[in-house]
Amino acid sequence: MLDPDRLPRHVAIIMDGNGRWAKQRGLPRVYGHKKGAEVVKKIVQKTRSLGIPYLTLYAFSKENWQRPEKEKKFLFSLLKEYLKKEVPELRQQEIRLKVIGDREDFSQDIQEMLEWAEKETEKGKKLTLCLALSYGGRAEILRAVRLICGEVKKGKLDPSEIKEELFRKFLYTADMPDPDLLIRTSGEMRISNFLIFQMAYTEFYFTPVYWPDFTEEEYIKALEDFQRRERRFGRINEF
Ligand code: IPE
Ligand code: IPE
Ligand code: MG
C-alpha cells in the first residue's frame, strides 16, 4: 500500500549482484549484466508510472575500471545497445537521460553517444533518468574542489563564499535534489563510493536479491519500507 503523497522525489540504486546471479547458474558473469539491463527497463518504467521524478542508477564506477578487459568490453557494448534501442523510446515517454561521472574516461564513440542521448531526451519532463558512468563520489568532490579553486584563482570567487549551496553547483548533480532513498541489491551493505556527498541524509534499503532478480514487487517493498521511516534531519519529533 503506497501513499502517493509520500513518495521519494529521488531514488538511487546500486544495481549489484549481476556476476553472482550468473555464477549461481553456472553462466559467465556477462549473462548477469545482460539480464540486469532488462531489469533496468522495467524499473525505469515503474518509476515513471509512479510519478517519481528522479532515478539515479549506478551503472559503472570509477573503481570498476579495474575489472577484466573482456567484462568491460561487454558492459560498454551493452551500454551502446541500450542507448541505441532505448533513447527513441525515452524521448517518446518524456524521460530525460542525464549522465553523471567522468565521461572523458570513455572512448570517443561512447562519449558521442552519451552526448546524443542527452540531447535527444533533453525536453523530457516526466522523469530524469540519471546514469552514473565512470562515477566515483570522491572523484566528484575533488573535481568540484579543482573547479572552485580555478574560480578563486581567476578572482571570480572569494573563499568566504564557499558555502554548501555554492559547492553543490560544482557537483555533477547540481540540478537534482539529493536522493531520498538508496536501494542496494545483492546483500552488500556499503555505498561503494556512490553519491557520498549527496547521501548525507538518505534512507538506505538493502535487499539480498541479486539485481537480475529484482522485480517491480521488490521495488514496491523498498518504497513501502521508505514510507515507514521517520526522517528527522537532526531535529526531534514533536508529535
Ligand atoms: C553490478 O554487478 C554491475 C556492475 C558493477 C557493473 P556486479 O558485476 O558487481 O556483480 P557481483 O557483485 O560481482 O555479483
Ligand atoms: C558498485 O558495485 C558499482 C556498481 C553497481 C556499478 P561493485 O560490485 O563495483 O561494488 P563493490 O566492489 O562490491 O563495493
Ligand atoms: Mg558487485
Image: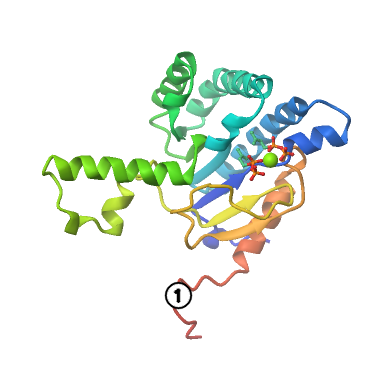
User: Residue 128: percent from the left, percent from the top?
Assistant: 46, 39
Q: Residue furthest left?
A: 155
Q: Is 137 in front, or is 216?
A: 137
Give the percent coordinates (x, y) of residue 42. 66, 36
Number of numbered tags placed on the structure image? 1
* Image position, residue 173 (x, y; %): 40, 44
Q: Residue furthest bottom?
A: 239
Q: Residue at x 43, y 32 (%)?
A: 102
Instruction: Name the secondary structure under disc 1.
Output: loop
- Judged left or right of residue 139, residue 80 is right
Left or right for 35, reference 6: right
Ligand 2 positioned in quadrant: top right
**Residue lying furthest top in this view?**
109
Q: How is the image coloured?
A: rainbow
Amino acid of disc 1: Gly
User: Mark 1 = which residue?
Assistant: 234
Residue ID at (17%, 45%)? 152
Identified at 46% across, 25% down, the residue is: 105
Residue 220, given in percent of the width and then of the height, sits at: 68, 53
